[in-house]
Image (cartoon, rainbow, N blue to C red):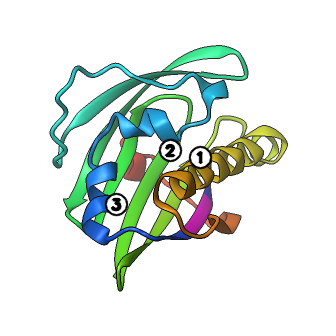
Amino acid sequence: MRVFRLATEQHLTAPLAEIFTFFSDAFNLERITPPWIRFQVLTAAPIEMRVGLEIDYRLRLHGLPLRWRSAITRWEPPHSFTDEQLHGPYRLWQHEHLFTADGDATLIRDRVRYAVPGGVLINRLVVERDVRRIFTHRGEVLREIFGGERMHVITTRETATTVRKEETGA
């Protein structure tokens, strides 16, 4: 399975505690996801973030209704957490969220590893563009809420390695 990577970073003009509290609320994902995806958290509130937590979502990609279940696999407040897709449209989705205080501001970074059915061709034709659009929208909404810089997409590239089935749990 071919694995692709996306990395972003963005400076926001709010303190680390405020930014991490925002990201600790799973329902804020609805606020920062583009409306064209029709993203909705299905897991009942309240959702207490912790390692092992599973969250269910409903969304639409290119008009197709999809379900997504993710798990929090790392939770290290207020500096980082990782969510991984258990069920959904990707063959692999691992999203690491990193937060660093920068005086009264915060640097947020995202590191995503993903794989898609159809591999390189489908990624180049559809998925890479969609993932960039989703993160660009997210960055704009975060900038509107907290102030700061535009989100910068640092990389979107294919890794030279493949992931074995036992690494993905498949």
Q: Is residue 170 visible?
A: no
Residue 69 in the figure: left or right of residue 92: left
- Taking the spot 71% from the left edge, 46% from the top edge, the residue there is 133
Give the main secondary structure, helix, strand or loop, of the magenta stretch: strand
* Percent position of residue 8, x then y: 58, 66
Q: Which residue type does callout 2 highlight?
A: Leu
Alpha carbon separation for disc pair 2 and 1: 5 Å
* Of the two numbered discs 2 and 3 in the rendering, the one whose residue sits closer to the viewer: 3
The residue pinned by badge 3 equals 19
Q: Specify the quadrant that holds the C terminus.
A: top left
Q: Position of residue 30 (x, y in %)?
A: 45, 32
Magenta residues (range): 5-9
CA gap between label 1 and label 3 equals: 29 Å
In reply to whether residue 108 is colored magenta, the answer given is no
Describe the element under mark 2 as helix, strand or loop.
strand
Q: Which residue is mark 2?
A: 92
Q: Label for residue 115?
A: 1
Secondary element at tag 1: strand
Tell me if residue 29 can be seen: yes
Left or right: where 96 falls relative to 60: left
- In the image, residue 98 sits, relative to residue 131, either above or below, namely below
| Residue sitting at x 35%, y 48% | 83
- Residue located 51% across and 54% down the image: 142
Q: Amino acid at mark 1?
A: Ala
Choose the circle earlier in sequence order: 1 or 3.
3
Seen from the viewer's position, the closer of residues 17 and 115 is: 17
Q: What residue is drawn where x is 44% and y is 52%? A: 94
- First in sequence: mark 2 vs mark 1: 2
